[in-house]
Every structure is written in structure tokens, then in C-alpha cells.
Image: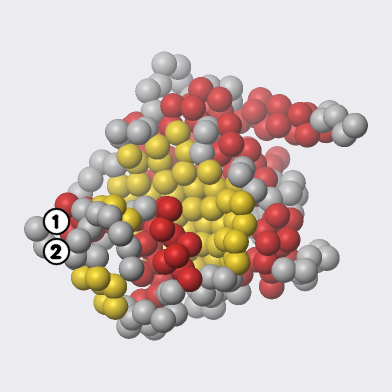
């Protein structure tokens, strides 16, 4: 099915177009498999699907799989975790902050409230995934790629997707419209108690995350049931066979520090809100 020794994000759409048809995946030719695939396999397994994945034991892909599964330790990986409650969400977001602190070159002290704000934004994604999952479980993982200074965060659930949630309050006609609506300011807030000073920012959800990703030279991929959406390219496709939602965040860590963290989240938040409110429309 897949050509080449590296299975990355470019093959994700084709992979999800055939996910229902396959129970066995042969990756014995692969040297690298992006962590999003392992998160998807894990989500399928915990939701009752008998999935088998074959990888050569003498390949780098197998060694990397050991890191992702948590069987080997790595300073660049937060292994796959199945989160089932708010406490486990808290632990994952704290692990994420610790990973970022290890790999961001800090030339000035970053205020603890800024870290708390970031934890809140990520926790909102996870809490929404828990709220909308059939089994109140979501799979998460994080990987830092030192060679290109990029970080990837994946959240996978086998739930009801964006449309079934958003259409309860907003006039949307399909999954793509629901995802685009969820990216608007104030739409996708989680009903949880925020962290630290983040209470000021309840309801910004994916809106703030999408802006941070754009300013960090990254991309946000959202899969919701049969639909694929990529921001900021505004690319969308249909015909996938997933049931639930997948959110994948990838961004450049140096640009994230320069354009977001060094400013401070309060300053950054005010900047993106003011830019939206003063944008020319003619």
C-alpha cells in the first residue's frame, strides 16, 4: 500500500481511506513510521478492533516503536498514553511542558503563568476528546524531532466527531463546516476549571491553538469522521473511514519560542485578538 521507507503525514489520508478494510498492516519495509499511526492503532485496539502491525525487529522503525510504546526511554518522546480522566490529562500536559522546557533554549525566564496557559490550551483538546468519545478515552502522544526542531502532538479518539457536537449549537451542514466553526473564537471551550490565570481565556480553544501554530510555522490537521482539514492551508478532503476525531499539531519550536513564548501569552493573546478586530474587510 505504502511506497518508500518512511511513513509520514503525506500518507495519512490514504491510510485513513482504507482503515476499515484492513485488520493487518505490513510495515516490514519501513525505517520510520510517524507517531500518529501508532496513536491510531492504539485507539483502535482500546476500542475493540483486533489490529495487527508487522515491523522488522532489526529496523529503526521497531526501535522507535519501543520509544513510542514507552518500553524504552527517550528525552524527545512522550509515549502513547490512554487518558481517561482529568487527572491523567493534567499529567500529560505537565509532561509536555517538561519536554518543551528541555528543548527550548531559554535566554530569559518564562513566566509560570505562560506555561499554565499552554497546559490549559492542550488540556482543552484532551478534555473535549474525552467528553465526545464513546468510551471516555483518548490516546495522546508527543514527539520532538531535533533535526528539524519540530514538535508533534497527536490526540486520537473513537467518538462522535465534530459535526455531532457543533451542530447542537450552530448551523453547520457537514463535518468540514463544523471543524471550521470550531476554529472560531469562543466556540470550542471545554467545560472544565482552567489552570492558573488561564481562566481569562476560557472558550478560545482551537482558535488560539490555530494562531499559535500559524505563527510557529506549523500546521494543524483535524480529521473528523469522513473528513480531513488542514490549517492554515485551508485544505479539506472527504472519503475517510475514521469514526471519531484526530487532532494533530506540528510546529517549529524555535519559532514558537520567538513569536509566542518570548512575548508572553497575555501579550500574544491581546495581539491576535486586536489583529482580528481591526482587520480590513474592504
- In the rendered image of this protein, does residue 271 appear above or below residue 124? above
Query: Which residue position is annotated with label 2?
Result: 56
Residue 242 in sight here: no
Residue 160 in sight here: yes
Residue found at x 50% / y 77%: 135
Residue found at x 26% / y 60%: 69
User: What is the x, y in percent for residue 150?
Assistant: 40, 37
Query: Which residue position is annotated with label 1?
Result: 59
* Mark 2 touches mark 1? (CB < 8 Å): yes
Q: How is the image coloured?
A: secondary structure
Q: Secondary structure at mark 2?
A: loop
Whether residue 56 sits left or right of residue 86 in the image: it is left
Residue found at x 30% / y 34%: 146
User: What is the x, y in percent for residue 132?
Assistant: 59, 70
Tag of residue 161: none
Q: Quadrant of the N terminus?
A: bottom left
Residue found at x 49% / y 48%: 249
Amino acid at each position: 500500500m505504502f511506497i518508500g521507507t518512511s511513513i509520514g503525514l503525506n500518507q495519512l489520508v490514504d491510510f485513513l481511506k482504507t482503515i476499515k478494510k484492513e485488520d493487518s498492516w505490513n510495515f516490514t519495509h519501513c525505517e520510520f513510521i510517524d507517531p500518529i499511526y501508532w496513536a491510531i492503532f492504539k485507539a483502535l485496539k482500546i476500542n475493540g478492533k483486533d489490529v495487527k502491525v508487522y515491523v522488522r525487529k532489526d529496523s529503526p522503525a521497531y526501535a522507535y516503536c519501543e520509544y513510542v510504546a514507552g518500553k524504552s526511554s527517550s528525552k524527545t518522546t512522550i509515549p502513547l498514553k490512554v487518558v481517561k480522566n482529568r487527572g491523567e490529562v493534567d499529567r500529560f500536559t505537565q509532561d509536555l511542558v517538561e519536554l518543551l522546557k528541555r528543548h527550548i533554549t531559554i535566554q530569559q525566564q518564562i513566566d509560570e503563568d505562560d506555561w499554565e496557559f499552554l497546559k490549559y490550551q492542550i488540556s482543552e483538546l484532551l478534555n473535549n476528546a474525552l467528553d465526545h468519545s464513546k468510551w471516555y478515552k483518548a490516546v495522546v502522544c508527543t514527539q520532538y524531532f531535533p533535526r528539524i526542531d519540530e514538535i508533534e502532538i497527536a490526540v486520537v479518539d473513537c467518538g462522535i466527531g465534530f459535526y455531532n457536537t457543533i451542530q447542537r449549537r450552530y448551523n453547520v451542514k457537514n463535518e468540514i463546516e463544523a471543524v471550521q466553526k470550531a476554529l472560531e473564537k469562543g466556540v470550542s471551550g471545554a467545560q472544565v476549571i482552567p489552570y492558573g490565570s488561564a481562566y481569562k481565556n476560557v472558550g478560545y480553544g482551537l482558535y488560539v491553538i490555530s494562531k499559535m501554530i500559524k505563527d510557529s510555522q506549523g500546521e494543524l490537521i483535524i480529521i473528523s469522521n469522513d473528513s480531513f482539514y488542514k490549517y492554515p492551508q485551508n485544505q479539506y478532503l472527504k472519503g475517510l473511514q475514521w469514526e471519531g476525531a484526530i487532532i494533530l499539531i506540528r510546529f517549529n519550536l524555535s519559532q514558537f519560542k520567538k513569536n509566542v513564548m518570548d512575548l508572553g501569552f497575555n501579550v500574544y493573546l491581546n495581539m491576535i485578538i486586536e489583529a482580528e478586530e481591526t482587520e480590513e474587510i474592504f
